[in-house]
Amino acid sequence: MSTEGQLSELERALYARQIRLPGVGESGQLKIKGAKVLLIGAGGLGSPAAMYLAAAGVGVMGIADPDKVELNNLHRQIIHGFDTQGLPKTISAAEALAEINPGLKIILHPEGITTTNAMELVSRYDLVLDGADNFATRYLVADTCVLAKKPLVHGSVLQGAGQVGVFLPEAGCYRCVYPTMPKASDVPTCAEGGVMGSTCGVIGSWMASEAIAVILGRRTHSRLLIVDVMAGSSRVVQVQPADECPSCGEHPEIHSIEPALYISDDCALSVSPMNETPLEISIEDAARLLSGAKPPVLIDVREPNEWEICRIPQAKLIPMGEVPGRLSEIPQDVPVLVQCHHGGRSLRVTQFLRSKGYTKVSNVKGGIEAWSLKIDKTVARY
Ligand SMILES: [Zn+2]
């Protein structure tokens, strides 16, 4: 379309409205043009992500997906159509993308990403977008990105909600938040899932926006965007590198891609699951759970002097510094909520517990301060 290092007249016209944006300009457009992006999964999330990245002028896009287009994909996988049913998704997607942007160089990886090819595949690209539909692939992609030092934009959806993760090298990875792959028994069956196509559209488009932000150098920290599309709300959780992380921590356990770590679940979920217990929940949700029939265990990680001022009746006090030595008092097999004053310390404890194999633990956002303000005004503030 043009020589390296400059835009052609056609490209200037094509991307005029985008180039005009503050912080983009011709130099930004050239960065987008120079980007080599690897898309894992050309499904519900990969469809909008790939279409918007192609339209934005990304130079090279690899598409890794081993599946074929099926009828029940079409309500959400909008890159495919009735006429490409039965074709490999890579080919179907490439046809659609060539219509959107003939200048895009597309590389097909119809074998998908595997433990054998992951390192070689990822190292050929600048940035990876993961819209995979199963945990084995998700963890494989996340670990490979850490080992290859590549930024990762992750997306997942379940029913009316989803999340977008941006994980930059050495700034906190997917396993810093979700250290261990859930067991097959914890994963909902195919039939239990369900998703609105437009929810995939929101999350996939958001993934494209984050990918462009990374390409333009606008992201300096890893973070998770949690989007409740059904409720029309979203929030950001900053991700800190976790010392205990098995992938990127101080003493990582994962030094190479070992196939045994990524045993695939037989049930290839047709819906990308986000069945992980959420990293954080709102104070309203915490109150609802605590007053329910099977309330979660609530751990207060503040200091004893703070506990003396106020407390939530159901809480058990284990100050943050004592948590590592008192793990036996925190059950692993039931939901656990962690709470502090404002939600900062408890988020760190939540990440720590997850690194120790607690998969059902969530931070209570806003802490006891939010409890005083929104749930029970008789609880003292300080
Ligand atoms: Zn990590």
Image (tube, helix red, strand yellow):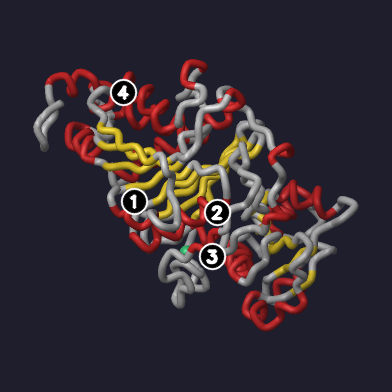
- The kind of residue on which mark 2 rests is Ala
3D distance between C-alphas at marks 3 and 2: 10 Å
- Please name the residue shown 18% across and 37% down the image: 27
- Label 3 vs label 4, nearer the camera: 3
The mark nearer the N terminus, 4 or 2, is 4
Image quadrant of residue 70? top right
- The kind of residue on which mark 4 rests is Ala
The mark nearer the N terminus, 3 or 2, is 2
Q: Is mark 1 within 8 Å of ligand 1?
A: no
Name the residue furthest bottom. 325
Labels 3 and 2 touching (C-beta < 8 A):
no
Q: Is mark 2 within 8 Å of ligand 1?
A: no
Name the residue furthest top. 83
* In front of the other: 303 or 100: 100
* In front of the other: 113 or 346: 113
Q: Which mark is residue 121?
A: 1
- The kind of residue on which mark 1 rests is Leu
Q: Which mark is residue 136?
A: 2
Q: Position of residue 381 (x, y in %)?
A: 71, 60
Q: Quadrant of the N terminus?
A: top left
Can I make out residue 309 in this image? yes
- Check disc 3 and report the residue beneath it: 260
3D distance between C-alphas at marks 4 and 1: 22 Å
3D distance between C-alphas at marks 4 and 2: 30 Å
The mark nearer the N terminus, 2 or 1, is 1
- Check disc 4 and report the residue beneath it: 98
